[in-house]
Amino acid sequence: AILLIASKDEPYGIRDDAGLQLAFQRALGTELSLRWCLWDDMPHNWREEQQSLPVIRSLWEGRNAHGATAELRKFLQSLAIAVPQLAADYELILWIVHKRYLLQLARLGVPIVPTVLTRGEIKNAGDLKREMEKLGWVEAVLKPACGTRCEGVLRLSIAEWSLRIAMEVAKLLRDSEGDCLLQPLLAPCRQRQANGSSQPGDGSVNIEHWGEVCVLFINGKIVHAVHKTPSKWGWHRAHCPCSFLGEALAGAECECDSLGSTRGGGSGNIGSGTSSSATAKPDVAPVQQLPLPLPGTMEAAAMAAATALPRADELMLFRVDLLPRFSASGRIEWLVSEVE
C-alpha cells in the first residue's frame, strides 16, 4: 500500500499528483492500494499493513517562522524508525525546512545564490536598505527563511525605495519574526540585439524571464532535468524563455509553443515587472525537458550540492534548483538556489 501524505490545505495533493498516482499504478499494477492521509492524522494501524510505504507530498502546516514544529519533527522521526530505508530522506526534509542550509552548503564549497540571513543582524527596513547598499545590491529579494510557495516574497529596489516599501519590509520581518533571507536579484541573461548577436545584460533582462533549472536525483544520480519558466507576469511573456538556455546548451531548440506545464515555484518566481515589490506568484510555468548529460558547469554545481547533503550516499530522492549568473567576462556560473 502507498500512503500519500499531505497537509490539510491540500488533502489530495496538487494538480501534478494525478500523474504521480498514474505512474505508481503503471509501475506496480492497478491492484496497488493508494490512499491519501494527513501527516498529523495518520491511520492508526498503518505500520501494521504489509509493505506499507509512506510517500510525502506536502508538509506545509508543519512549519513555523523558524523551522519545523515539534509535532512535525516527532512525525518524521517516527517515519525514520518505521521505514529505515528512507530515514536519510526524512532527515533531509527537516534539514531543508529552514533555508539556512544554503549557508551550510556554501561553507562546504557549493556555489549558491549570495544569501544573507536577517535574523539578529537586520532588525528593520533601514537596516535592510543599508545592507543592500553595503553589498552593492541595487535590486534584491527578501523572503521568509521558512517560506513556501513563494508566499511573502518581496522584490526590492534601492532606486525605487519608498515609505510603502519600507512598511512592507517591516511587515515581512515582523511576520517572519525577523527570520528572512536577503538575496540579490540576479541578472544573468544576455540581451538580444537586432542583428541576432548578444551582449551581457545590464539588469533589464533577468531571472524573471526564464526561471530556473530543476535537477532531479535518484540514488545520487541525475535522472531528469527541466527548464522551468515563470508565467503570467505581463511584459515578461514577450521574451522567449528558451533563448538564454539555448545558448547555455549550445544551440538547443526553442520549444516554447509545444511545452507542457506545471506549477511555479522556487527562487526565480518572484514579483512583478511593473512594481518594485510584490507578493504575486505565478500560476503555471512552461517546462522544457533538458537533454542529458547536462553542460559541465551546470552538472558540476548540481553534483556539488548533491554530495554535500547530509547522509548524501543514503538519499533516495531529492531535487536541486539552479540559477545562472554571467560573470564579468560573460561566462555562465550556475548557482544553487534551493534543495527539495
Image: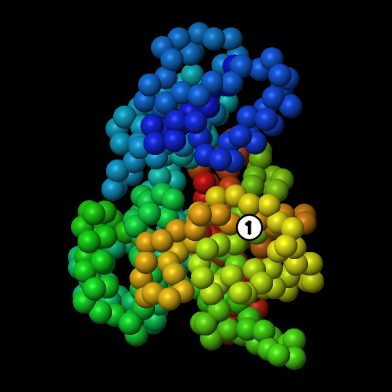
Q: Say whether residue 143 is left or right of residue 119.
A: right
User: Observer-nearest residue: 80 or 324?
Assistant: 324
Q: Quadrant of residue 150?
A: bottom left
| Looking at the image, residue 293 lies above or below residue 19 | below
Q: Quadrant of residue 53?
A: top right
Residue 277 appears in the rendering: yes
Determine the residue positioned at 58% across, 57% down: 285
Determine the residue positioned at 79% across, 67% down: 253
Which percent across, then down, holds residue 307? 59, 49
| Looking at the image, residue 26 lies above or below residue 17 | above
Q: Amino acid at mark 1?
A: Pro
Q: Say whether residue 116 is left or right of residue 197.
A: left
Which percent across, then down, holds residue 121? 24, 65
- Residue assigned mark 1: 286
Determine the residue positioned at 37% across, 51% down: 147
Disc 1, SS: strand
